[in-house]
Structures are given as C-alpha cells and as structure tokens.
Image (tube, rainbow, N blue to C red):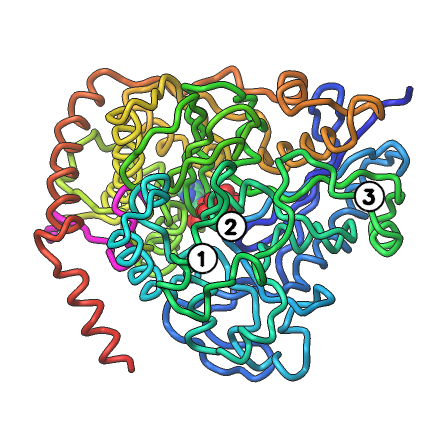
Amino acid sequence: MSKKYAIGIDYGTESGRAVLVDLSNGAEIADHVTPYPHGVIDETLPGTGAKLEHDWALQHPDDYLEVIRRSVPAVMKQSGVAPEDVIGLGIDFTACTMLPVDENGTPLCFLDEYKDHPHSWVKLWKHHAAQDEADRLNEIAAQRGEKFLARYGGKISSEWMIAKVWQILNEAPELYDRADLFMEATDWVISQLSGSFLRNSCTAGYKSIWHKQEGYPSKEFFKALDPRLEQLTDTKLRGSIVPLGTKAGQLTPQMAEWTGLTTDTAVAVGNVDAHAAVPGVGVVEPGKLVMAMGTSICHMLLGTEEKEVEGMCGVVEDGIIPGYLGYEAGQSAVGDIFAWYVEQAVPAYIEKEAEAAGVSVHEWLEKKASAYKPGQSGLLALDWWNGNRSVLVDTNLTGTILGLTLLTKPEEIYRALLEATAFGTRKIIDAFQDNGVVVNELYACGGLPQKNRLLMQIYADVTNKEIKIADSKQTPALGAAMFGAVAAGAEKGGYDSIVDAARQMARVREETFKPIPDNVKVYEQIYQEYCRLHDYYGRGENDVMKRLKAIKEKANA
Ligand SMILES: Nc1ncnc2c1ncn2[C@@H]1O[C@H](COP(=O)(O)OP(=O)(O)O)[C@@H](O)[C@H]1O
Ligand SMILES: O=C(CO)[C@H](O)[C@H](O)COP(=O)(O)O
C-alpha cells in the first residue's frame, strides 16, 4: 500500500490552518493558513456597517469555507501528494462558536431578509453579550437543584450554547422562530464537507449541557427558563450526537472539486481545538494536563472518575479521548492580554527600540523582562482582561495591576502580565488537585510556547512542575488529522482508535522547561498574594469591578 495521509484543519479565532500529515509518523508535510477575510466582527456588521453592542463577537460563515477553498488546495500543491492517498480529513474549532441555520442548513445571515440582523450571524466563542441569560440560567438551575451544574464547575458560561440561544430568543424572537437548527460551527462545517448533519459528543457535552447517560437537562428546566424554550432540545438542538472519531461521511463532489481531493476521503465528525490538541501531543491517559496556549488557554485533563471541581468548564465522558472522563478548564485571555499591552499601552520609544533591533515588541519586552528576578518589580496583576473563565466563571470581572510607581518600566508590566496568567493557571491546577483530579505532568502546545521562553519558564516556576512542549506547531490540526485517520479506519491505511493514532503520530520536544528552585520559592509567596487578591475581588468581598462595569454600561447606553 502506498503511504497514506490525512488533513487536519484548525479553525482558530482569527484564521484557519490546514496541515497535511503523514500517517506513518505524524510528520507535517505541508501547512497553509487562511486569515478570515472578515476576522472577528466586533464593531460593525458587514454590509450595513451597523454598530454592534459592547461584548459582541461575530464571524462570517463563508470565511470558514474560504479556508477549505484556499488552504486545502495549497497543502495538496505544496506536498505533491496524490489525492487518493489522502484518506481522511478532520477539523477542530474554537467553541462554542454557533450559528442559526434554515431547513437547508443555510446560515440565516446568508439570507437577504436576515443579513442585516446581527443575531443571524455566527456568534464566536468570545461573544460575551449573553451574560444576563447565563446569570439567570445559573440562578434558576441552582434554585431547582439541577445536578448538571456540578459537572460544569457550578456555573454555565455565557460563552456557551444555551445562553447564546436564549439571548437570540430574547432579543430577536422572529429570528429564533425562523431558525431550524442552532449548530456549533464545527458541526456546520462538517455538514458542508460531508453532506451529513451530526452533532459531536465533545461540543454537545462541554457546550450544550448534554450528558452521555442523562441526555440534555429536562424539558421542565427549559420551561422554567422560558416557556418558549421548553421543546428546544427536541427541535432546534435536535440531531444525533456521536463520539469523536466517528465517520460523518465522505467529501461531497462539490468539496472534492474545491479541495482537489477525492470523494473517497473520509470526514470525521467535528471537534474542539483544545480537545483535539490532547492526542496531538500524545496524551491518552490521566494525570497529564495539556495547556493549549494561544490567545486564551484551555486546560485539558483525563480522569477515570467524575469529580466536582470548582469553576471547571466541564467534565464529559468520552469528551476528549473515548473511555475517559475529559476535564476542561480555561483562561479566557492570555496571549490577548499581552497583545492588548503591546498594541494599546506600550510607549513609542519601545516600539522604536524593537524596530531598531529588528524584533517584535513582544520579543523586545521578553528580552528586557528576562533581566528581572521574580518579585523584583513589586507588581502583581489579576489576569481578568476578558473576565475569569475558571475558577470564578464570571465575565464581568476585569483586569488590574497593583504596585505601580513612577519608576515602573514597561517591561516590568509586561512581566507582571505574563506572571498573572501563570498564577491563573496555578489556581486551576490547585482546583483540580484539591478535588482529587491528579495533575502529575504539564504539556504545552499552541502558539505561545514557540514564541516566548520567559513565559514558559515562569509557568514552570509558578506551578513547580516540568513542562513538556509539543513538537508540532499545529497540534490541534495534527489531532484533527488523527481523528480523520480514525474515521478512515485501519483497513484504508488509517487507525482503528485515537490511542493507536496518537502513539504512532504524536511527539514532544526533547527540551523541557524545569522549575528553578529559587524562583519557585519567591513565586510561592507572590501566588499567596494573588490568591488573596483573587478572592477579594472575585468572590464578592469587594464588588467594585462589577459596579464600575454597570456605570460604564449606563454611560455608554
Ligand atoms: N512573543 C510573544 N510573546 C507572548 N505572546 C505573544 C508573542 N507573540 C504573539 N503573542 C500572542 O500570541 C497570541 C496568538 O497565539 P496563537 O497560538 O498563535 O493563536 P490562536 O490562539 O488564535 O491559535 C496572540 O494573542 C498574541 O498576542
Ligand atoms: O473555549 C474554547 C475551547 O473549549 C475555545 O475554543 C478557546 O478558548 C479559543 O481558543 P483560541 O485561544 O485557540 O482561539
């Protein structure tokens, strides 16, 4: 049999990237990135230019198809691989990224009558405007003693499906009525690729409150939220929910034409970026926490028992690797915080110095910040620039920096921001460990470990754990390709299980980041201060952040 290959497509926040992978050893033969032509739509709606409200984040569904039209032919051309040797295709996506579609699976924003309506567009994972609905949902679920809350760390996030659907119902009931289905974007793209509509168990479990044994919450619960939602799960959320690695179908003739592949290529059901990254780094057993580090961080962990962990995003049976309980927690801004600082707050002289040195502002600040010892700046920041996803689950919280003086330098602030995100991760690790979910080892993948060594050393020092780094630069896409190979099956030259695929195809780098004992000691002290500040602002002792947000919203109304 000739060598066989699979393609993984990773749909990120700003762009989609396709990777063509050799199934015998996981080697990435070719990759190509397509920036989304419309990017993140968070200010004005395409076409009308209508201003979007604060906290909105939308996307254009055709941008996802553009990735298929451009990046797949590009990797085929670069690699020179014969189309018939590409036996499988898998995708992973940011989530919950959701959209309303009509009975033909057409996004409502493609229809003339709805294209000017903001609610007809894709709501990106970081659309945070459904917080009121999320708050109300959590209140009602708590009053009713709904058991599912514990599986989601005690709170359902405004980023997820039910809060977003309810926001549409509240603000655009006619559009809610018109929607035949609300779909995760990852399932919608798979329906376009394969012609079949299946929901994957990962997004259903983590983002839509679905449980393998218990199904969705009861109709009474949905009725208690709003009588109009009573039938939601049988109507607009209907559909078969199938495990990761299931074959959705084969490429449609139209997709074969766009991509240059054949209609024999097996297509796996959809997946989530962070979850696909876990087999992508070779983790297929408990105790190994995988951090997918980019604009945000997702923390992924396998376990054998269902435990309750404060503020975790969720625990889902078979949600990451079939046969295990998959735990997820996260920080909703990490790289985005550093980007904010570099783009919005760095003084012009730093930009000039970086330019003169021929490096990016990030790299310049990293170099200068590396000269400081832990604790030397006297600064401490809370990493809540985009709210707190775990453990507080509150998008109304905001960032803060303590300890500024007239002598504070930009690189000290940059370092404090790196440290703040590491403290946020430590808090998440502690929450898992305190509740009996063991974390023995750390694995990192995503863009950040490749970009910033100081950041990785700080994470090793703050957590006092060695960190292994994925060898692949495109770990979620590699994981997605593995699931594509599983959809194709061993008979065709793929694999029968994701465990087999990961053992054969995943790699970590030889170099790891090890904790430096002197740094660990100082960071332990600062972390205790972080915890005090975290609880003071985050657990209701001082609600100033929320009060300021309310004043801001009124002033902006
Ligand atoms: N040298 C750097 N140090 C720290 N952060 C960086 C650096 N360069 C870029 N970033 C941040 O990395 C993030 C992008 O991470 P990446 O993994 O490539 O993207 P994504 O999360 O969309 O997959 C951006 O938020 C950006 O600010
Ligand atoms: O919540 C998620 C996964 O469960 C999102 O997909 C994630 O936070 C966005 O990832 P990225 O920072 O890579 O764009």
Image x and y of residue 96, in percent: 50, 53
Query: The disc labelled 2 sits on which kind of residue?
Result: Ala
The residue indicated by pointer 1 is 219
Q: Residue at x 71, y 39 (%)?
A: 268
Q: Residue 140 appears at what percent x and percent y?
A: 29, 58
As drawn, 325 above or below 263:
above
**What is the number of the mark on residue 95?**
2
Residue type at the position of mark 3 = Gln
Of helix, strand and loop, which mostly describes the magenta segment?
A: loop
Q: Are marks 2 and 3 in contact (CB under 8 Å)?
A: no
- The secondary structure type at the circle numbered 2 is loop
Task: Mark yes or no: residue 548 visible.
Answer: yes
Instruction: Choose the circle earlier in sequence order: 1 or 3.
Output: 1
Residue 385 or residue 251, whichever sits in front: 251
Residue 356 visible, this angle: no
- Classify mark 2 as within 8 Å of ligand 2 or not, answering yes or no: yes
User: From the viewer's perspective, is 476 left or right of 254?
Assistant: left
Q: Residues within 10 Å of mark 2 (few under 14, many from 20)?
A: many
Q: Whole-Å distance between the Cαs marked 2 and 3?
A: 24 Å
Q: Which residue is mark 3?
A: 250
Q: Quadrant of the N terminus?
A: top right
Is residue 391 in the magenta section? Answer: yes
Toward which corner of the image does residue 528 lie, by quadrant? top left
Chain part drawn in magenta: 390-406
Question: Which one is in front in this view, the residue at disc 1 or the one at disc 2?
Answer: 1
Q: Which of the two marks, 1 or 3, is nearer to us in this view?
A: 1
Q: Residue visible at 56% across and 21% down? A: 282
**Considering the numbered disc 3 on the image, is that residue within a helix, a strand or a loop?**
strand
Q: Residue at x 42, y 33 (%)?
A: 327
